[in-house]
Image (tube, rainbow, N blue to C red):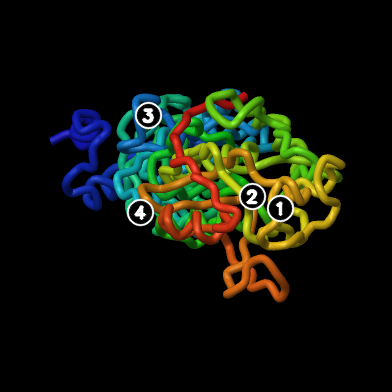
């Protein structure tokens, strides 16, 4: 049986008796090199790698994500680029097991047989390849490589280095067989589940924040809590204490959200926002991870127990900067409009199923939430009845509106 014909027939599959075949091929090639006095070894190295190669879904490849400004992500995600590699981030669902990549190699030899080994030499990788055989490979043809192993089981941003060990056996007698070693470095996101609107194709800039804030989390609830904390603690935004005007969205219902502007202003100085901004931001950043957050709007809302609005101090009179109201941040616990006390005419936040999450404020959860000392708590993880009792003052009483769900787009 002709060994060369055997491998040509099996192109693209792992052959049986591979070890015997490799030995015979090496003998044939070495004999050719000796008789023709060939002195040139094959050089072969990765030229381009695609992680997201199938835009129909992510059953066997990476997710479709967008670049930092919401534009199309560069493909392929890794390219040799004359020795100055271009490496774009990519994303998988945590625990995803069925994955493959597309890769093509450049070489100084036109046709050859390849044996490919792919190992992780540093970091946490997305898989390995062991002794994958390709017959009659032509340089720059695309190959599909099935990866072994699973994606890590928690949210995060991870880096790794692959070592490509490629043994090349030429068809051309002018070349001798050789082993090439080449390293490629990569960064990827691990998400909870499929991203959802308005981030069904999440922006990489959003994932940079969300995966960092929720790093290590394994559930929608814990990830949403970490996104609440990240938005509240790390954006340097200030709640509008004049009249609660939004900065990135026209109103609290279906108007679109200026995500581009928000991303450019995180960490800025004197960036004044309101609950519409924070509620929609929470849904955007959480749903980029697949949390399943729903944006809701309550009208009317009511007078407040002492809250600590984002970037501000404790107050039960949220619009103390407005001359129409008292200038005191904390007023009498039973005061109303006639006493100069302001209230939330409406309020926006998020929920998952029947559990509520608010990135705009913290609450006082002690026995007297209208006075010092304050027992500070995040406003998340509660059902509607508990959330309302923690945030809305019971005297003066208000018929607080049941939260209504709204969707919106981003730009």
Mark in the foreground, 4 or 2: 2
Mark in the foreground, 3 or 4: 4
Q: Earlier in the sequence, mark 1 or mark 4?
A: 4
Locate the N terminus and report the quarter of the image it occupies: top left
Name the one closer to the observer, 235 or 8.
235
CA distance separating discs 3 and 2? 58 Å
Name the one closer to the observer, 301 or 266.
301
CA distance separating discs 3 and 1? 60 Å
Q: Which residue is mark 2?
A: 360
Q: Which residue is mark 1?
A: 310
Mark 2 surroundings: few (<14), some (14-19) or many (≥20) residues within 10 A: many
- Tag 2, which secondary structure? strand
Mark in the foreground, 3 or 1: 1
Q: Are marks 1 and 2 in contact (CB under 8 Å)?
A: yes
Q: Which residue is mark 3?
A: 137
- Tag 3, which secondary structure? strand
Q: Residue furthest front?
A: 338
- Tag 1, which secondary structure? loop
User: In this picture, is 186 found above or below 305?
Assistant: above
């Amino acid at each position: 049986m002709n060994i060369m014909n055997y491998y040509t027939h099996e192109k693209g599959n792992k052959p049986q008796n591979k070890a015997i075949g490799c030995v015979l091929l090496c003998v044939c090639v070495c004999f050719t090199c000796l008789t023709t006095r060939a002195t040139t070894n094959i050089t072969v190295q990765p030229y381009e790698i695609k992680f997201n190669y199938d835009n129909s879904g992510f059953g066997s490849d990476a997710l479709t994500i967008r670049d930092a400004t919401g534009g199309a992500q560069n493909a392929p995600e890794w390219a040799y680029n004359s020795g100055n590699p271009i490496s774009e981030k990519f994303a998988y669902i945590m625990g995803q097991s069925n994955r493959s990549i597309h890769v093509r190699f450049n070489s100084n030899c036109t046709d050859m047989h390849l044996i490919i080994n792919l190992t992780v030499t540093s970091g946490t990788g997305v898989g390995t390849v062991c002794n994958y055989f390709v017959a009659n490979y032509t340089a720059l043809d695309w190959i599909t490589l099935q990866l072994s192993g699973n994606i890590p089981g928690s949210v995060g941003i991870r880096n790794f280095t692959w070592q490509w060990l490629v043994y090349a056996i030429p068809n051309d007698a002018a070349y001798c067989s050789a082993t090439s070693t080449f390293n490629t470095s990569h960064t990827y996101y691990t998400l909870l589940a499929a991203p959802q609107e308005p981030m069904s194709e999440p922006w990489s800039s959003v994932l940079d924040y969300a995966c960092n804030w929720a790093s290590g989390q394994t559930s929608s609830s814990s990830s949403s809590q970490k996104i609440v904390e990240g938005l509240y603690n790390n954006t340097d935004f200030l709640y509008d204490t004049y009249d609660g005007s939004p900065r990135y969205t026209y109103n609290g219902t279906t108007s679109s959200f200026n995500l581009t502007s928000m991303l450019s202003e995180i960490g800025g100085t004197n960036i004044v926002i309101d609950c519409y901004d924070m509620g929609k931001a929470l849904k955007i950043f959480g749903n980029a991870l697949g949390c399943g957050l729903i944006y809701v709007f309550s009208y009317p809302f009511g007078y407040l127990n002492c809250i600590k609005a984002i970037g501000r101090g404790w107050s039960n009179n949220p619009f103390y900067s407005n001359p129409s109201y008292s200038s005191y941040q904390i007023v009498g616990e039973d005061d109303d409009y006639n006493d100069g006390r302001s209230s939330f005419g409406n309020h926006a936040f998020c929920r998952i199923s029947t559990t509520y999450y608010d990135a705009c404020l913290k609450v006082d959860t002690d026995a007297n939430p209208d006075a010092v000392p304050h027992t500070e708590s995040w406003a998340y993880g509660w059902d509607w009845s508990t959330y309302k009792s923690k945030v809305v003052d019971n005297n003066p009483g208000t018929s607080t509106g049941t939260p209504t769900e709204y969707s919106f787009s981003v730009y």
